Each structure stands twice: as structure tokens, then as C-alpha cells.
Image (cartoon, grey):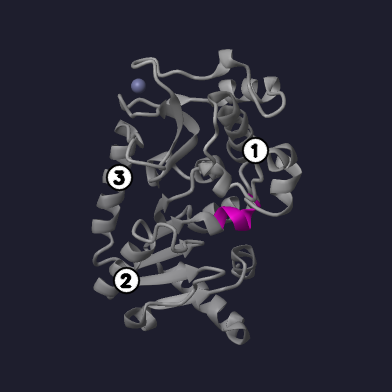
Amino acid sequence: MKENFEKRVSKLRELMKSAECVLIGGGAGLSAAAGLTYAGERFKANFSDFIEKYGMTDMYSSSFYPFATQEEKWAYWARHIVLNRWQPPALPLYLELLALVQDKDYFVITTNVDAQFAKAGFSVERIFAVQGDYGNLQCAQGCHNKLYKNRELVLRMEAEEKNCRIPSSLVPKCPVCGGEMEVNIRMDEHFVQDEAWYAAAERYEDFCSGVRGRRTLLLELGVGYNTPGIIRFPFERLAYENKNVFLVRMNRDFPEALPQNAKSTLSFREDIGAVLKALP
Ligand SMILES: [Zn+2]
């Protein structure tokens, strides 16, 4: 695949130019390429105390750690949320992506919960963040479908955390049922989808229906096999069912095309940033 990089880049350039609509599918690999890596040095540098105490290995698996107390759980999550949601500015890779599509009729569907698309300036009306947002809390039981911005709270938790615990007074409680709270990311069946979520889902469906008959580029970025039913498989179906839809797949581990879509898929195993930089 390496040898014809220039050829594939110029094909992508052509596709971008002629596309009337661009549908971006952003997965974990996109934010990792942008710098929000969940393992390795960045994890070690920020979580050495948690690593020592709980044997954590990376920020994916630690999200599922069964903390014995709410004070420990929120000590972990406060740091995780600040580090990945509130602290980072819009990252250059996302800004480059916006520059690429801002003059097109575009839409974004993403499983990322770090709000990078919104930070970069993608229109919030054109983003569907299916799996939630680190920046919101919800009732752990989903007893009502309201979300609560957590910025001030998690910053305070982080400031007052000692020995991997926060003070009990900062542990959030559901204002309706009085039970525990949870980060609004899809982990189980209690995930809360509020009105804004359903409105975004509808706009996404409308956009997908609208691509039929229009020259459309599907830009699938860093989407692997964690939740392929959300972006990867539907994108393949769109490309398969519509002659005017072309799929560009950038994926370090799984760049291959569906055999039936071989002629309407362009694959990149290269770093997403390197591909975008080679484009103009
Ligand atoms: Zn509740």
C-alpha cells in the first residue's frame, strides 16, 4: 500500500474537489492521531498514582475500573475528564479537517466523546456525537433524561483530590432520585439520550437520506471494530447502495475495503495527519 501513497492522495484530492456532500465518521483513532492518546507516555505521565494503586494500564480499561467507593471513582474520572475534555484546546488535526470541509455540505457522526469537533468550530447543528460527552453528567440509573455540565465540579474535584480520593461532599447525587451520577458516555443501558441527542440523530438521518443522487464523500477516520455498527458498517452500506457515494477509509489497523466495495473505497493506513498534510 505504501508505494502508491501519492497516487491515493491525488485521488482523494479529486474526490474532495468534486464532492457535493461530505459525511465524516470520526472514531477513537482520529482523536489518538490528534494527540489524545489513551495509553503509553501520556497515560503514565498523568496517572502514575492511580497506576501504582490500582494497576491501571491505559485510559480505556481504567474507564471500566470497579472502584470500591464513589470518592475514588470521581477522583479518577475528574482527572480523566479534565485531561481529555476540558483542558485540551481544539487540536490542529481537527482544525485541518474543518478547513477541508467547511465550504461543503458536511455532517459529522462520531463515537468520540471529547467534543473536539465542536471545539474546532464544526457547526453543532452538523454533529451527532452518538456516544455522549465527557463534559456532561447524568443519573446513573437514567431516571430522567437531563444532562448536567460538569466543568466546575470536576475542576474542583481535581483540585481537592488527595491520595486518589475526593472529599465526600463533592460526590454528585442525582437531583431527582438522589442516587449516584455517571458520566454521560454510553457504557450500559442507562445511557441518557436527551432531546438534543434525538434532534442530532434526526438531522443525521436526514443528511444520509439526502446524499442519494448527490456526489458524496464518506470520510471514515480512525473507526475500528469497537462499535462498527455505528459508523463503519453503515458507511459501507451507503457506499454499496449508492453509485455516487465514495468511501475514504483512514485506519492504522483496519484500512481494508469491503470486497464488494473495492471500486468505491480508497484506503489509507498512514497517519491521518500525514494524509491531510499531503492534500493541499
Ligand atoms: Zn436519578
Marker disc for residue 116: none
> 238 above or below 27?
below
Marks 1 & 2, CB-CB < 8 Å contact: no
Amino acid, disc 1:
Leu
Region rendered in magenta: 30-36
For the point 24% across and 64% down, the residue is 212
Q: Where is residue 137 in the image (x, y as percent from the top left)?
A: 45, 28
For the point 47% across and 68% down, the residue is 16
In the displayed structure image, the side of residue 29 where residue 47 appears, left or right: right
Mark pair 3, 1: CA separation: 28 Å
Label 2 Cα neighbours within 10 Å, binned few <14 / some 14-19 / many ≥20: many
> 277 above or below 168?
below
Q: Position of residue 133 (x, y in %)?
A: 47, 38
In the displayed structure image, the side of residue 168 where residue 267 appears, left or right: left
Marker disc for residue 201: 3
The residue wearing badge 1 is: 83
Between residues 94 and 111, which one lies in front from this camera angle?
111
Q: In which quarter of the image is the C terminus?
A: bottom right
Residue 279: say if magenta: no
The residue wearing badge 2 is: 239
Mark pair 2, 3: CA separation: 20 Å
Q: Position of residue 143 (x, y in %)?
A: 30, 25
> 135 above or below 71?
below
Mark pair 1, 2: CA separation: 36 Å
Between residues 261 and 175, which one lies in front from this camera angle?
175
For the point 73% across and 41% down, the residue is 52
Of labels 1 and 2, the one closer to you: 1
Amino acid, disc 2:
Ala
> N-terminal of the two: label 1 or label 2?
1
Label 3 Cα neighbours within 10 Å, binned few <14 / some 14-19 / many ≥20: some
> 169 above or below 23?
above
Amino acid, disc 3:
Ala
